[in-house]
Image (tube, grey):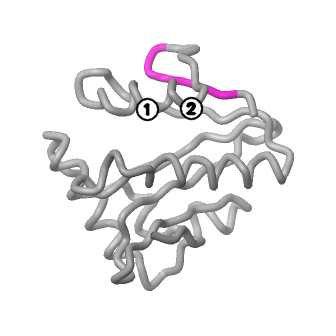
């Protein structure tokens, strides 16, 4: 597995992986509009988006963030791992990549919106293991 900065040639594979992951969680898969144009929704705003690739050059994970205007906070987005590859450290590696980058550029706080515990049970287990704490209903944050 390797983690790289998102490249446009992986867009469709990324979208497919996320839709498949949502389906595996028992949710009706819906398309997140930001994924249609990652350049506009992340890079053009000065933010980042990474993908994890397997040995066959297929997308197996993702994570991105958007900065909060006039603050040192960021909102983490689209931390997904291919369903059949969960619990192998891919999500942790993606989160670590994002957090190390954010520290390097002087960001102080990472916020994640989790949604309700019924549909996102794994997320509610994952983030506290990495130092995130609930601060509002459905939101967690970590001070870097």
- The image position of residue 110, as x and y in percent, is 66, 35
Q: Residues within 10 Å of mark 2 (few under 14, many from 20)?
A: few
Please give the residue where the numbered disc 1 appears in the rendered image.
126
Residue at 73 percent across and 55 percent down: it is 101
The answer to which quarter of the image holds residue 32 is: bottom left
- Say if the magenta span includes residue 139: yes
SS at badge 1: helix
Quadrant where the C terminus is found in the figure = top right
Please give the residue where the numbered disc 2 appears in the rendered image.
130
Residue at 44 percent across and 21 percent down: it is 138
- The image position of residue 11, as x and y in percent, is 40, 75
Residue range corresponding to the magenta coloring: 137-142
Q: Residues within 10 Å of mark 1 (few under 14, many from 20)?
A: some
Left or right side of 27 for 12: right
> In this view of the protein, which residue sits in the foreground, 45 or 21?
21
Q: Is residue 76 above or below residue 59?
A: above
Quadrant where the N terminus is found in the figure = bottom left
The answer to which quarter of the image holds residue 142 is: top right
- The image position of residue 77, as x and y in percent, is 50, 47
Q: Is residue 65 above or below residue 117?
A: below
SS at badge 2: loop
- The image position of residue 23, as x and y in percent, is 16, 49
- The numbered disc on residue 34 is none
Question: Magenta stretch mostly in which secondary structure?
Answer: strand
Task: Determine contact: label 1, label 2, CB under 8 Å.
Answer: yes
Residue at 23 percent across and 22 percent down: it is 118
> In this view of the protein, which residue sits in the foreground, 34 or 61?
61
> In this view of the protein, which residue sits in the foreground, 67 or 122?
122
Left or right side of 91 for 4: right
Q: CA distance from mark 1 to mark 2?
A: 7 Å
Left or right side of 52 for 60: left
């Amino acid at each position: 597995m390797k983690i790289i900065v998102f490249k446009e040639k992986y867009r469709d594979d990324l979208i497919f992986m996320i839709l498949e992951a949502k389906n595996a969680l028992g949710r009706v898969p819906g398309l997140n509009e930001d994924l249609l144009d990652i350049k506009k929704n992340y890079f053009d705003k000065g933010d980042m988006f990474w993908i994890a690739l397997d040995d066959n050059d297929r997308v197996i994970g993702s994570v991105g963030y958007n900065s909060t205007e006039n603050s040192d906070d960021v909102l983490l987005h689209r931390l997904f791992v291919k369903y059949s590859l969960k619990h192998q450290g891919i999500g942790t590696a993606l989160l670590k990549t994002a957090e190390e980058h954010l520290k390097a550029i002087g960001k102080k706080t990472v916020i994640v919106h989790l949604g309700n515990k019924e549909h996102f049970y794994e997320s509610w287990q994952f983030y506290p293991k990495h130092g995130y704490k609930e601060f509002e209903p459905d939101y967690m944050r970590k001070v870097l």
